[in-house]
Amino acid sequence: MTGDLAVDARGLVKAYDKTRALDGLDLSVRRGTVLGLLGPNGAGKTTAVRILATLQPADEGTATVSGFDVATQPHEVRTRIALTGQYAAVDQYLTGHENLVMIGRLTGLTRRDAHIRADQLMTRFGLADAAGRPSKTYSGGMRRRLDLAASLVARPDVLFLDEPTTGLDPASRRSLWSVIREIVEDGSTLLLTTQYLEEADALADEILVIDHGRELARGTARELKERVGGERIEFTVVDHSRTGEAAALVQRFAAGDAVVDPARGTVGFPVDGGDAHLGDTVRALESAAISVADLSLRGASLDDVFLSLTGRTAEGSTEQLQEAQ
């Protein structure tokens, strides 16, 4: 393994019957950084994490974590990692403090050290006032923070966060993001799986976009956004049956391929000199008597990247999250 890599996986393959959850995936995380593993449900994110955390074997490929092989040295790997899954795994009948003490004892701390560590983490995660309450009385955001605190009791070298903010409201998600940033500032290495484009943008030093168990693109958020252009014009066609026609009309103004979603009636394309082409777009559509709504000029986003790569939006986009609430 390259010395500066905390996680290094090559050619990972995992099949269930005839379905390949992972199809030759390469994945690496530099020490002290956050890799955002971005993809929709079924992309293979959780399967990759389970293999790296030694919870299931790969059918093909190799992987090392903190310099140890996940297949041949699983014990060494497990003593150096922690995993926070999609749902809080805390004992609801124990208090928050008791949960952390229990984890500390299970990981080999003395009773005294386990209590000290629990006190430190309850304070750090803003849970000190609720330390004596059963965790079943905690809000969803508080339980997720407690679950994350439990993952840090043993001070792992590498922390796997598998969609850690699933089901949280926007305020709770942003609160948890602040905690995650603090963990990284302390020097931890994180592999973060997420459907939320905003989350990957806010937290990840590097992003790996996958779908159907394969890599689609990788790079920083800025590098990925630059792939689809610095500015974009987008609009919604009122009559969705004319979406393709509208896209063809405006393609001549585009600095790259237009991304079209006929089901939603949306068209988006990168432009050079956005203000001028905004007027050109309006005139072209008016001349063809195509009615549109929400026509705008804006900077590229990770949603644009994902749509251009997969032909669809990520299921966990901010827009869809808000619609569901």
Image: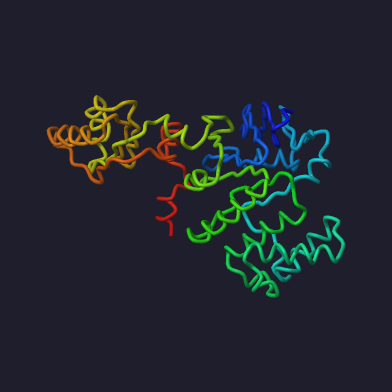
Check the picture and name the quadrant holding the C terminus.
Answer: bottom left
Q: Does residue 302 appear to the left or right of 115 in the view shown?
A: left
Q: Does residue 207 appear to the left or right of 308 in the view shown?
A: right
Q: How many marks?
A: 0
Point out residue 162 in the picture as x, y percentages from the top left corner: 62, 47
Q: Residue at x 53, y 61 (%)?
A: 172
Point out residue 51 in the picture as x, y percentages from the top left corner: 71, 38
Check the picture and name the quadrant holding the N terminus.
Answer: top right
Point out residue 98 in the picture as x, y percentages from the top left corner: 76, 68
Point out residue 314 in the picture as x, y percentages from the top left corner: 46, 42
The residue nearer to you, when weighing 85 against 262, is 85
The relative height of residue 181 versus residue 252 in the rendered view (above or below) is: below
Q: Residue at x 54, y 46 (%)?
A: 203
Q: Residue at x 31, y 39 (%)?
A: 266
The residue nearer to you, when weighing 246 against 156, is 156
The relative height of residue 25 versus residue 171 in the rendered view (above or below) is: above
The residue nearer to you, when weighing 275 against 41, is 275
